[in-house]
Image (tube, helix red, strand yellow):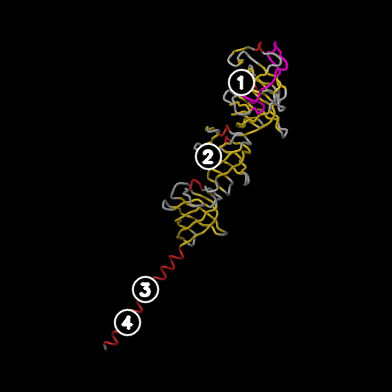
Amino acid sequence: MSKIKLYTSIGAMALIAAFVIGVKANTAEAATTTNAIKVQGTITAISGTTLPAVITMTSGATTYTVNIASTTKIVRKYNGSSDLSEFIVGDIIQVTGKLSDAATNTIDATTIKDLSVQRIGGNFKGYIVALDCTNNKFTFKPTDREQQTVIVNSSTKIIRNGLKIKCTDLVAKEKTKVIGIWRTTTKEIMADRIIVYTKSISGTISGITLTDGGLPATLTVALKNKQTWTVNVTSTTKLFRKFLGKATIEEFLVGDKIEAHGSLAETNTLNALMVRNTSISVKYSDFKGTVKSIDAVAGTFVLRINSKKYGDITVTTSTSTKYYDHETVKAFTDIAVGDKLKVLGAYTSSTKKLAATRVFWQD
């Protein structure tokens, strides 16, 4: 055989071998590509939360068996880390992996994404509809969404006024913010933190009940919308006058206008943290006028104020009231009709009474 024929035969055999190898390689690549799968469906069964585990899911008319190994990546809708303890039957999941058995639709999962569970967007503001603390949950109505069920557990932090409270301390209709993991398919929020907002009301006192003349006390308050509220006042409640000077419960009278802030005890009942009586104000320079009359028995006198805004007011005095005429110390008995005085004290606009702490004679 000539060298030319020999070289031609060798070259032809090499081309055939290369073609065969290429066909085999392409066939293997095609098989690998064919085995890769990404499918979305609904969970119908879960073998357990400990890995390895098996999930059964349906996608259209097809049922898949999904094998989950310790190396499988498990995430929520927006790729936050998750685990099978967050998965439940009915969740919509997206599975990426390898179709290990086409006959039984078995998938060895590399990644599973639970599209029904998300932390992003799991921040809601709304109010409590109904409580079921025996079963560690309550019904919640977010402002911009339909009603949800909030699930609480031992690690859930429930905070009101900076203090940690229990589920049983919550009250229906309280405004709250719930932060946690949101399960969209079942309308459930697994709460990490629940923040309870204080309730504020304003109205007119229609009744006062004191305990031995002091605290604790109960105020009945009529609101502009004709609702009647009960405001519980205790020794820890901060009481203020109109301009935030400290007040006492004895200064409060029926007819006074108030603003109360606190937490709901029950429907239309407020445990007050702070009450501001806007009918009481302390003036230190405005109450200048002329004495019109004196009641020595009651220890009061009528002062005509040098301002049309106030007119005549009744000045009440006590044993602690101090009287001064420049550098000279005086007494109530030194007051005479026609005297020009400046009076400091707590003024209640609803009764036009001024509880005097200091009385000064004016030139």
Q: Residue at x 69, y 31 (%)?
A: 203
Q: CA distance from mark 3 to mark 2?
A: 62 Å
Disc 1 to disc 3: CB gap under 8 Å: no
Q: CA distance from mark 1 to mark 3?
A: 96 Å
Residue kind at label 1, given as amino acid type: Leu
Q: Position of residue 257 (x, y in %)?
A: 68, 28
Question: Which marked residue is nearer to the observer: mark 3 or mark 2?
Answer: 2
Nearer to the camera, 286 or 194 = 286
**Mark closest to the chain's N terminus, 4 or 2:** 4
Disc 3 to disc 4: CB gap under 8 Å: no
**Image quadrant in which you'd find residue 348:** top right
Question: Which marked residue is nearer to the observer: mark 2 or mark 1?
Answer: 1
Looking at the rendered structure, the secondary structure element under dot 2 is strand
**Mark closest to the chain's N terminus, 3 or 2:** 3
Residue kind at label 3, given as amino acid type: Ile
Looking at the rendered structure, the secondary structure element under dot 4 is helix
Q: Position of residue 72 (x, y in %)?
A: 44, 53
Q: Position of residue 97 (x, y in %)?
A: 46, 58
Question: Which residue bears the numbered disc 2?
Answer: 193
Question: Which residue bears the numbered disc 3?
Answer: 21
Q: CA distance from mark 2 to mark 1?
A: 34 Å
Q: Main secondary structure of the magenta part?
A: strand
Range drawn in magenta: 277-302
**Image quadrant in which you'd find residue 136:** top right
What number is the disc on residue 11? 4
Question: Which marked residue is nearer to the observer: mark 4 or mark 2?
Answer: 2
**Mark closest to the chain's N terminus, 2 or 1:** 2
Residue kind at label 4, given as amino acid type: Gly
**Mark closest to the chain's N terminus, 1 or 3:** 3
Question: Which residue bears the numbered disc 1?
Answer: 215
What is the residue that sits farthest to the front in this orientation? 363
